[in-house]
Image: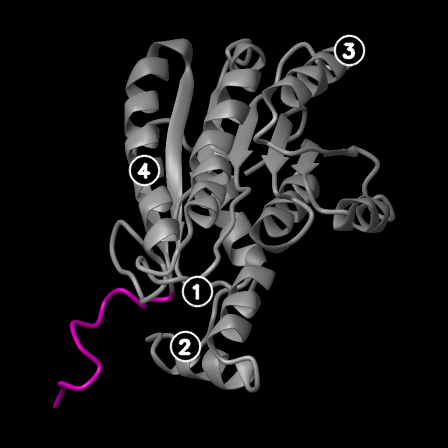
């Protein structure tokens, strides 16, 4: 699978899953524009440029439609089209339904749902100019398939992205744009590490170990493994798949229970 001459936009690419996808895309020849709100983006771009010249970063709040429009106009100075849009940016803060403030609820909704909507709307005109456009949305197994205590807001938003993916796939199929969603389980990312700290600030490693033991493959996934899945969905080899949700979780959603067995 080769992405030479392909142009990709990846949100949340400064770290975690987004960085894994970025590294795989760059290694396969793509030119990558990273959109991220984190100040870590500057260091990420500096590090990536040691090996790749075709990576550009924009610090942006995807809740800000005006800022996104300005970035699109800037990118249009260099690109006649984009081929791949990866909606990876997202947040997860634990709080039970009864204790969750409206502000924290809206924080999840505004970034995970509205932010994805905003980015897609802003870049769609450029994406429609590609002969083989791809949109890849990062949902989660959390929400559509499973959930833990404290994940109501996060689960709701990630479930919403499934409907967004399917409906958008139907609308864009005649524009040569395929739209699919990746549903990660536990991948070793800063988000998972932060969830572990929120669960047990004194011993987050114990939380990670408990997660590991519950996964049939007995390990958390890597961001590069997730990046390789995104690579397939972004490639020309993925030519007959749209509106689908693809799980990458090491089998963590397979067990019916952890206590029953021969």
Whole-angstrom CA distance, mark 1 to mark 3, is 39 Å
The answer, for residue 130, to whether it is visible in the render is: yes
CB under 8 Å between callouts 2 and 4? Answer: no
Q: Which mark is residue 186?
A: 1
Badge 1 marks a residue whose secondary structure is: loop
Labels 4 and 1: the sequence-earlier one = 4
Whole-angstrom CA distance, mark 4 to mark 3, is 34 Å
Labels 4 and 3: the sequence-earlier one = 3
For the residue pair 152 and 256, the one nearer the viewer reads as 152
Residue under pointer 4: 160
CB under 8 Å between callouts 1 and 2? Answer: yes
What secondary structure do most residues of the magenta stretch adopt?
loop
Q: Is residue 224 above or below residue 257?
A: above
> Quadrant of the rendered structure where residue 257 is?
bottom left
Question: In the displayed structure, does residue 98 sit left or right of residue 32?
Answer: left
Q: Which residues are magenta?
A: 250-262
Residue under pointer 3: 77
Question: In the displayed structure, does residue 77 sit left or right of residue 192?
Answer: right
Badge 2 marks a residue whose secondary structure is: helix
Give coordinates of residue 146: x percent, y percent.
26, 60
For the residue pair 256 and 102, the one nearer the viewer reads as 102
Crowd around label 1: few <14 · some 14–19 · many ≥20 (10 Å): many
Give coordinates of residue 255: x percent, y percent.
21, 72
Question: In the displayed structure, does residue 83 sit left or right of residue 153?
Answer: right
Labels 2 and 3: the sequence-earlier one = 3
Whole-angstrom CA distance, mark 1 to mark 2, is 8 Å
Residue under pointer 2: 211
């Amino acid at each position: 699978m080769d992405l030479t001459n392909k142009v990709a936009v990846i949100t949340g690419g400064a770290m975690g899953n987004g960085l894994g996808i970025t590294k795989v895309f760059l290694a396969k020849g793509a030119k990558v524009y990273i959109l991220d709100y984190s100040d870590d983006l500057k260091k990420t771009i500096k590090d990536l440029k040691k090996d790749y010249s075709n990576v550009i970063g924009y610090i942006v709040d995807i809740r800000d439609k005006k800022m996104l429009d300005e970035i699109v106009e800037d990118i249009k100075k260099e690109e006649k089209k984009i081929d791949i849009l990866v909606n990876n940016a997202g947040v997860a803060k634990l709080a039970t339904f009864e204790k969750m403030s409206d502000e924290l609820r809206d924080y999840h909704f505004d970034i995970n749902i509205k932010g994805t909507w905003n980015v897609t709307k802003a870049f769609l005109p450029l994406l429609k100019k590609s002969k083989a456009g791809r949109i890849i949305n990062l949902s989660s197994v959390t929400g559509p398939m499973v959930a833990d205590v404290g994940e109501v807001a996060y689960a709701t938003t990630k479930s919403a992205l499934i409907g967004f993916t399917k409906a958008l796939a139907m609308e864009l199929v005649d524009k040569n744009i395929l739209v699919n969603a990746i549903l990660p389980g536990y991948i070793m990312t800063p988000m998972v590490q932060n969830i572990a700290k929120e669960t047990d600030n004194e011993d987050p490693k114990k939380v990670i170990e408990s997660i590991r033991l519950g996964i049939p493959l007995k390990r958390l996934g890597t961001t590069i493994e997730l990046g390789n899945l995104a690579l397939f969905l972004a490639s020309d080899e993925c030519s007959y798949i749209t509106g689908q949700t693809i799980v990458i979780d090491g089998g963590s959603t397979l067990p019916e229970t952890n206590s029953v067995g021969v």
